[in-house]
Image (cartoon, rainbow, N blue to C red):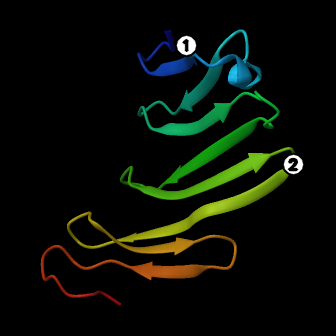
Amino acid sequence: MLAYNGLGDVATECESLANLPSSEAALAPSGGYVTTYTHNTAGLMLTRGYAAAGGIQAETLNYGYDLYGQPTSSTRNSSGFGWSYVKAVGYDEFGNPELYTMGTDGSTAYLSSPTTSRRSG
């Protein structure tokens, strides 16, 4: 089941699992798994929230974008604990991602340039 916001973007999604073995039934909440989304006026997803279920805490993923709408970051917030999955993304002149800065330690991963097939950086 999907619910939409005023701009036509998905705001809430609810999934139910069918045919679960009885030994796994405790993992599936009676109301289904609920995921919520927020978007900006350009339609870019700002947050994705997962409700607590099956003994797992609720979690919110936050997304950042540059002035051109390209994704630049993805962070997590769960029970006051934050974590950066992607801290920064660098793009080439054609808008292709070529550099990722990952995690809280700032590890960097370089991608090959699709135009030259050479490693950038």
Residue furthest out toward the bottom:
121
- Local packing at callout 2 (Cα closer than 10 Å; few below 14, some 14-19, many 20+) is few
In this rendering, the answer to whether 11 lies above or below 38 is: above
Location of residue 107 in the rendering, given as x and y in whole percent from the top left corner: 57, 81
Earlier sequence position, callout 2 versus callout 1: 1
Residue 83 figure quarter: bottom right
Mark 2 element type = loop
Residue 11 appears in view: yes
Q: 6 or 112, which lies in front?
A: 112
Q: Residue at horizontal 69%, vertical 40%? A: 60
Judging by the rendered image, the residue that carries numbered circle 2 is 80
Do the residues bearing badges 2 and 1 touch, measured as CB atoms within 8 Å? no
Q: 111 or 26, which lies in front?
A: 26
Residue 66 appears in view: no
Residue 21 figure quarter: top right
Q: Distance between the residues labelled 2 and 1?
A: 35 Å
In the picture, measured across the screen, residue 5 lies left or right of residue 24, that is left
Q: Residue at horizontal 16%, vertical 82%? A: 117
- Numbered badge on residue 19: 1
In this rendering, the answer to whether 13 lies above or below 51 is: above
Q: Looking at the image, how many numbered discs can be counted on the residues?
A: 2
**Mark 1: which amino acid?**
Asn
